[in-house]
Image: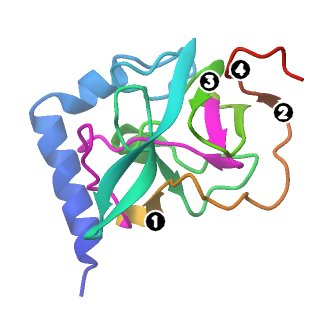
Amino acid sequence: MRNPRIIIAGLAVAAVAAVGGVTAASAGSSPGGSARSAGQSAAAATVRTAPAAVAGRTETILVNARGLPLYYYRPDMAAKSLVTGALARLWPPLISAAPAAAGVNGKLTVLNDAHGHQVAYNGHLLYTFINDHAGQVTGQGVQSFFVATAGLAPIAGTPAGTVPAAPTGGGLGY
């Protein structure tokens, strides 16, 4: 028997391609060929928390500046994204050279990889889901992606080639 999540994801790809969504998702690609959804800037991104219904429960999750839920991919490694090709078109990576945090206690870093400057939270690379809208979580558990929460435990090991995220607040960093 086929896995219903894979069938649903396959139908989503077909539906997105039929209405031109794959082209739109690819339109923001960097020269390296990574997919970037509309509104994801290589210059700046803000990661903040927001309440959302996840599997029937209200949880505080991480969202981008547009309120889109952020996910991590369980098979990813601390220093390498395993999300490529068609999977990256469905799950665009959060890209920013200087991400900022608002109301999160975890550590934001940037990994320079095939996607460009991909944002990580506590070492977990972050993605959005092409079918989500602000305040809507539809990708929980799909294709090994899970919604990122403020309490997401740090991934083992420190990714090489990361740079700290932009400081938040008005202090001088002391």
From the image, tell me which residue sits under label 4: 166
Q: Is residue 95 above or below residue 120?
A: above
Residue 63, image x, y percentages: 43, 39
Q: Residue at 60% across / 58% down in the picture?
A: 151
Tag 4: residue type? Answer: Ala
Q: Nearer the viewer, mark 3 or mark 2?
A: 3
User: What are the residue bounds of the magenta stretch?
Assistant: 118-141
Residue 51, image x, y percentages: 35, 50
Q: Secondary structure at mark 1?
A: helix
Badge 3 local density, few (<14 within 10 Å), some, or many (20+)? many
- Alpha carbon distance from label 4 to label 3: 6 Å
Badge 1 local density, few (<14 within 10 Å), some, or many (20+)? some
Mark before the other along the chain sequence, 2 or 4: 2
Q: Residue at 12% across / 44% down in the picture?
A: 15
Q: Secondary structure at mark 3?
A: strand
Residue 26, image x, y percentages: 35, 24
Count of numbered circles in the view = 4
Q: Secondary structure at mark 4?
A: loop
Tag 2: residue type? Answer: Gly
Mark before the other along the chain sequence, 4 or 3: 3
Tag 1: residue type? Answer: Ser
129 is within the stretch colored magenta: yes
Badge 4 local density, few (<14 within 10 Å), some, or many (20+)? some
Mark before the other along the chain sequence, 3 or 2: 3
Q: Nearer the viewer, mark 4 or mark 1?
A: 4
Furthest residue in direction right, as rendered: 174
Q: Residue at 24% across / 48% down in the picture?
A: 136
Tag 3: residue type? Answer: Pro
Q: Quadrant of the N terminus?
A: bottom left
Between residue 102 and residue 89, name the one nearer to us.
102
Mark before the other along the chain sequence, 4 or 1: 1
Q: Are marks 3 and 2 in contact (CB under 8 Å)?
A: no
